[in-house]
Amino acid sequence: MIVATPVKFEDGGIQVDAAIVADGLSITPELLLEHLREGRITSLCEKGVDQDSGRFRLSFFSEHCRFSCVVDESGKILQHSAIDFGVLPLPASARKPKG
């Protein structure tokens, strides 16, 4: 379920509707919050430059899945995608970069 503006930019932070991320990772919102607290789900925000200026890519990583969405400055989702490896672990190439 993707709503029009599930992302809010406030006080230098980003708030994302948990239902959107949970749906993208194929889990319940309750399990999402539990896994976030435990550090089993991590995230990454990348700010667009040049022709992507004004856009942000938000990525969420679980043990077996990566969910990403591109949003504009108003918080509207422009595109989204998920990679789910089922019972196999998410490969290093699909994970959050180290650094």
Image (cartoon, rainbow, N blue to C red):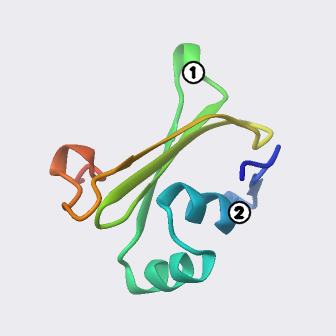
User: Which residue: 48% across, 60% down?
Assistant: 25
- Binning the other alpha carbons within 10 Å of mark 1 as few (below 14), some (14 to 19) or many (20 upward) gives few
The residue positioned 58% from the left and 38% from the top of the image is 56
Report the mark closest to the observer, 1 or 2.
Answer: 2
Which of 12/34 is in front? 34
Residue drawn 57% across and 65% down?
22
Residue with the mark numbered 2: 17
Q: Is residue 55 left or right of residue 91?
A: right
41 relative to 68, above or below: below
Residue at 79%, 49% in the rendered image: 3
Secondary element at image label 2: loop
Q: Is residue 35 above or below residue 43?
A: below
Above or below 1: residue 49? above
Q: Position of residue 98 (x, y in %)?
A: 22, 54
Q: Position of residue 36 (x, y in %)?
A: 47, 77
Give percent across and percent down for residue 53.
61, 23
Assess disc 2: are there few (<14), some (14-19) or many (≥20) residues with their C-alpha within 10 Å of its C-alpha: some
Residue 42: x %, y % from top left: 40, 66
Name the residue beneath numbered marker 1: 52
Q: Earlier in the sequence, mark 1 or mark 2?
A: 2
Asked where in the image residue 61 lies, by quadrant, the reply is bottom left
